[in-house]
Amino acid sequence: MDLRVGIIGCGMIGKEHAKRLQYKIQGVTVTAVCDVFEEGAKAASELVGGVRVYTDAAELINDPEVDAVVVTTPGNYHKDSILKAITAGKPVFTEKPLTTTAAECKEIVDAEIASGKHLVQVGFMRRYDRGYNQVKELIETGEFGAPLVLKCTHRAESVADDYTTEMAVTDTAIHEIDVLPWLIGGDEWDEVQCIMPKITKNAHEGLKDPQVMIMKTKGGVVCMLEVNVNCGFGYDINCEVVCEDGVINLPCPSFPTTRRNFEVATAIEKNWILRFIDSYDVELQDWVDNVKAGTTGGSSAWDGYTAAITADALVASQKTGKTEKVITGGMPEFYKK
Amino acid sequence: MDLRVGIIGCGMIGKEHAKRLQYKIQGVTVTAVCDVFEEGAKAASELVGGVRVYTDAAELINDPEVDAVVVTTPGNYHKDSILKAITAGKPVFTEKPLTTTAAECKEIVDAEIASGKHLVQVGFMRRYDRGYNQVKELIETGEFGAPLVLKCTHRAESVADDYTTEMAVTDTAIHEIDVLPWLIGGDEWDEVQCIMPKITKNAHEGLKDPQVMIMKTKGGVVCMLEVNVNCGFGYDINCEVVCEDGVINLPCPSFPTTRRNFEVATAIEKNWILRFIDSYDVELQDWVDNVKAGTTGGSSAWDGYTAAITADALVASQKTGKTEKVITGGMPEFYKK
Amino acid sequence: MDLRVGIIGCGMIGKEHAKRLQYKIQGVTVTAVCDVFEEGAKAASELVGGVRVYTDAAELINDPEVDAVVVTTPGNYHKDSILKAITAGKPVFTEKPLTTTAAECKEIVDAEIASGKHLVQVGFMRRYDRGYNQVKELIETGEFGAPLVLKCTHRAESVADDYTTEMAVTDTAIHEIDVLPWLIGGDEWDEVQCIMPKITKNAHEGLKDPQVMIMKTKGGVVCMLEVNVNCGFGYDINCEVVCEDGVINLPCPSFPTTRRNFEVATAIEKNWILRFIDSYDVELQDWVDNVKAGTTGGSSAWDGYTAAITADALVASQKTGKTEKVITGGMPEFYKK
Amino acid sequence: MDLRVGIIGCGMIGKEHAKRLQYKIQGVTVTAVCDVFEEGAKAASELVGGVRVYTDAAELINDPEVDAVVVTTPGNYHKDSILKAITAGKPVFTEKPLTTTAAECKEIVDAEIASGKHLVQVGFMRRYDRGYNQVKELIETGEFGAPLVLKCTHRAESVADDYTTEMAVTDTAIHEIDVLPWLIGGDEWDEVQCIMPKITKNAHEGLKDPQVMIMKTKGGVVCMLEVNVNCGFGYDINCEVVCEDGVINLPCPSFPTTRRNFEVATAIEKNWILRFIDSYDVELQDWVDNVKAGTTGGSSAWDGYTAAITADALVASQKTGKTEKVITGGMPEFYKK
């Protein structure tokens, strides 16, 4: 039996996920869509063959033909839908971030714990990227010894004019904040620092770019992250894991090598959508499979909460320039594996 | 509505395709399986949730709940099933080779033309490999000018003891024979030559390995292919397209780069299954989509026939050492696009 | 006419430089050698064809058949020889460090300024490495825009038991301290910070390794340096220059690529001697040419002094964990170009 | 004591070698230069500090202050100078080719044997290239097993209008003809074949380019060489040695890697001068050292002769399209090591 899914939020990513679930993912059927803008919901409905249309998330959540919910509204509307899904006892996949403040994330964590069931998955898709998983597998062989230092870049060709200095943390570095502790086997961030180099001429007025973020885990692993969103040459994600007995580098996307114009060259991916499009497929398939099996995968509500806490500390350091502590209160028993 | 597919031949590849169609490919349902060994058919049936079991291919083909057929029997049994499917007017996807002799291939081509419908696709999966398609797209931009020379390797770690000198052509080079003319935009092989270097100590008694095959198209493109099936270091497919204004190299599979033991290294794929597993998914999805849309894709019966003719010429050259002509009689109007 | 050179200090590096000057470098003759251990000086003399032997540096410096002096004693003996050479008005090439304390370096700087002549070159050989010069040339084209972030590694297979935590700065990072401001066109270090990750199991008792050093120039360029001297896999120097319009990476030494054991691999250089041996040749040739032409090149006494000041700040940060200021007092007019 | 060298032929390469010998190579002094155009000889003389000028090669050869001779005249004038040097018992380094016909080469071989002394070295500089030597060392470790197949490219950006189809062999492939048997440990060419692909639009009227040359050694090693002298993207020399237990690839010149314009790229060398300039230094230093030590190195007159014979066979195959035998008559005892 197919899992019946309702989608809340019919913007670009909502529509993409709707089509993905309806036409690419196995074992799932989209049965309802919801958007406060009815036209948007109707358009999404058409894309997936004509399904029930709602403008009120609560109604969709309580639809008996909706077994599980995907939340793709803007981040500041996540909380309500997620809490209602928890109340309804229905599994919910929410695009990142879990919510836009740590306090709201904590509400969700508390509600999920109170419900006694693991219902929430946050859409940090990098955990499903083939390359990150290859790196993780190599680390887990033990042949490289323990990770000691991580060196990452998160580069984008350019950003929109409304991209702010804070978003270098909350929209961009947030992916490394989530994926790196997972990558190295479950460590937690302990303290973070944001250092501001000279600003590139390519940044728009008021934006500090690039930024260097130094993050240390409780286990002593130090991460150096370059966020550089006006690099001009593509979407360029790198991750080097320096271990005791060797170094592992995340592979770049696979493109033909060419010889032309006095250069041997390989393409860099143009944007994040192309870079991680395969990961979205794997991620949603995994979510569907987990929901049907009653298991969990990906990033939990707790992961979403700690990401928010860590981001807050980095944003604080953007202003103070100092090292800031990441204080989560410790992982509840409920989330330990 | 799902396409209903019956599978003829329930060996390893038959079972793999059955599971792939039932659980990974969209828009298709396996409704019947057939094998002359009833136990094999029953086992395959179980794998896909229990479907109708046949021991006679004709019965499966004529089952009204079978819309299209996948043939995964040994190559020497392909012809009968394919001809019956053509007679029944049902689309048929056959694993490569089309059949084991050029004469039989020609029978199928003639039958398909007589039927007036494009029904046959041959399973040369490289046409669905992401890397080959990236190379093809670059060629098609025109920015590199016309292809002039192709330089390919087809290397495998080792082969079974029953692998013969001829199989370097019929089992191994057959993939390059099919994919290269397609890659460069539809050229045809004109003449071929097989050159025997010193034999590797790693080849078993009686096997000539490696082999160098020189193949020229009617358009004058020269291909140099190294077949080397005891290379010992993995499954290593390379293809360099030397064009008038640049050179394009097929990407290798994407793996993390490591630093260890005084070396910077990247893994080479272990075997062909891992190397082309993604291509099988894309290939069968494309076949299903095409069948449902009444269109065609991949390698046609004509492609299967010309591959057989070309292979025959190469096998002849293995013995004569001379350049041998590839004589197909010219592509029938029916197969021109 | 050949430049006549005397060498003070006949240990390993002294003997190497003696042979290099006598047999590889053009336009120079070694005429005298000196070591407090007469046997060492005699051995060095033999290596270069039998030249005058001294045990007192002052006597060698004042030998009328010595035009210029190379100092290759242990660092803590550098000062006296260098000051005497300045007094004698003879050009002096000293292996790095200039001296072992910033105060002594300052004495040399003051003496050189007082002499009114540029006489001192410090042996930071990376400025003569082909790769660094290629990177510098690319930066200087202006096509990449201004440098913003530098990401460097300084990795060695292992270190002797007497290598201390401080030496990660004074012996190892000292090379990046010198070469990076030169690389990006003459900036100066402003503040530095040393961060201690988890210690590798491969470090000997008491040694903190790896270390992460964050260094910022007055121009706002941020350098992240990984010092990792028990990496186990070779001598691995990397330098990535992130500029406004592109990124430039220092090339690794050139070795054949191999396919073996399921890996495509390229060798990593075994040790620093092999890595920079060519640079030593270029460096000493350049020194000889400059001395004969009455010009200067390479690292000046001022560069040696500021390297010492910067190293002191990093060593301080090793203990405080804080950002420490680099206070040099400002470059004297004498050293400005 | 410096070796005193006279240079015959003061064109571009003659002047370059004169400066190289006078100012870069150790243990050698240029004492005389000769050119039938006295102005050219005078200009060369000036470049090296003013040395004796001749217009008659015999006079230079017999100058008592000339210990050894470098021949850099056009190839068709080589024979006379070389024979006179042999008669005078003076070592001679000649730029490639030894002479322009196999018959003339044979005269030189016979004269050298008759003289009883090894006097002639031919300037095939690739034997001194660092990369080829690294590959040779790896082969000689035995870890890769015996070489079986060689795959080479010899690509140039473009050629002058007077470059002919034959010159693809005599000027271009001649380097591979010489270096490859040496590379794999002393094998000899047995038979060769030239295959003509479609001609690039970038070739000038009448020039067949690219060309594919298939060459087989007596030991059964098969070489596939792509000559492509209008590739448009640089001077691109590649050599892949396929061995029984692995594959070795010649390194490309070392350049920084850059990220720009949606590409990760590394430069390709612009032309052969830059590509092999280091090899010339090593080659002439080795020649000087050998002459002084009474030993030999590099390519012998016999190597020059067999290269000419092999080139003749390839040129024959350019016309016949057939496999042509390389018949040298067998290496004389005199040249065996």
Image (cartoon, coloured by chain):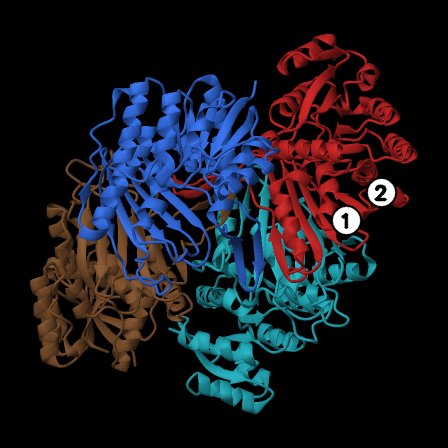
Chain colours: A blue, B red, C brown, D cyan
Rendered view: B201 above or below D47: above
Q: In front of the other: label 1 or label 2?
A: 2
Q: Amino acid at mark 2?
A: Tyr
Q: Residues within 10 Å of mark 1 (few under 14, many from 20)?
A: few
Give the distance between the C-alpha atoms of the residues marked 1 and 2, in whole angstroms.
12 Å
Q: What chain is tagged by disc 2?
A: B
Whether residue A321 appears in this view of the structure is no
Vertical placement of residue C57 versus A148, above or below: below
Coordinates of residue C270 in the picture (x, y in percent): 35, 47
In the rendered view, does A333 fall on the left or right side of B112?
Answer: left
Quarter of the image holding residue B19? Answer: top right
Asked whether C92 or A134 is in front, the reply is: A134
Residue under the point 10% across and 58% down: C76
| Front position in the image: C77 or B275 | B275
Residue for badge 1: B186
- Who is closer to the viewer here, D232 or A172? A172
Quadrant of the snapshot with the N terminus of chain D: bottom left
State which chain disc 1 sits on.
Answer: B
Q: In the orientation shown, which residue stands out farthest toward the top?
A: B39
Pinpoint residue C206: horizontal percent, then vertical percent. Answer: 14, 38
Q: Quadrant of residue A220?
A: top left
Circle 1 SS class: loop
Q: Residues within 10 Å of mark 2 (few under 14, many from 20)?
A: few
Residue that mark 2 sits on: B335
In this rendering, does residue C150 appear at all?
A: yes
Mark closer to the chain start, 1 or 2: 1
Front in this rendered view, residue D95 or C331: C331
**Seen in the image, is A218 located left or right of residue B209?**
left
Label 2 near label 1: C-beta < 8 Å?
no
Say which amino acid is labelled 1.
Gly
Taking the spot 69% from the left edge, 25% from the top edge, the residue there is: B2
